[in-house]
Image: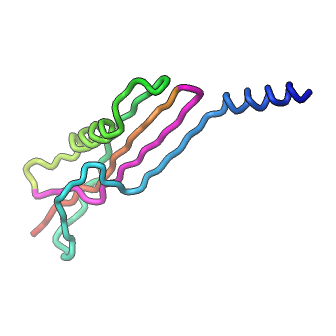
Amino acid sequence: MKKLSIILIVLSLSLTSCASHYGLPKNFNQNTTEVVLTKNNFKVVKIVKGEAEATYIFGIGGLAKNGLVAEAKAKMLETAGMEGASRTIVNEVVEVKTSGFLFISKYKVIVSAQIIEFTN
């Protein structure tokens, strides 16, 4: 009976899925541009986001974590429509979602930000 319960515990632990999510504002790329919004001379135009994901089997595959962030940010900038206007990106947030099952891990990176346009 003791062997059976140990086998069931090991089997149930190996079949469970682990998932985590953290979405704190992080600056993976270490940008040095600073925008100070002290006056009422801007308006929020839209909110944009970009996503990238990778799957790893036995730790092999996909892109490196910084590669996923760069890919997600590039997709976000494609939809930003910043050409030809005095616009900038503020409040950039990088979210990383991970999930796994046995020897398979999946990473999903979501980069979102607000696009503001200066009026004066």
The residue drawn where x is 31% and y is 41% is 69
Q: Residue furthest front?
A: 3
> For residue 120, what is the image quadrant?
bottom left
Q: Residue furthest bottom?
A: 39
Query: Would residue 9 be counted in the magenta stretch?
Result: no
15 sits left or right of 104 in the view: right
Colouring of the image: rainbow
> For residue 16, what is the image quadrant?
top right
Name the residue nearer the viewer: 120 or 21: 21
Name the residue nearer the viewer: 108 or 76: 108
110 sits left or right of 106 in the view: left
Name the residue nearer the viewer: 58 or 119: 58
The residue drawn where x is 20% and y is 74% is 40
Residue 105's x, y, as percent?
50, 31
The residue drawn where x is 27% and y is 40% is 70
Secondary structure mostly seen in the magenta stretch: strand
> For residue 73, what is the image quadrant?
top left
29 sits left or right of 100 in the view: left
Count every numbered label the image shows and give the total.
0
Q: Quadrant of the N terminus?
A: top right
The residue drawn where x is 33% and y is 37% is 68
Residue 97's x, y, as percent?
46, 42
The stretch in magenta equals 86-103
Residue 87's x, y, as percent?
15, 57
Query: Would residue 102 be counted in the magenta stretch?
Result: yes
Residue 81's x, y, as percent?
17, 46
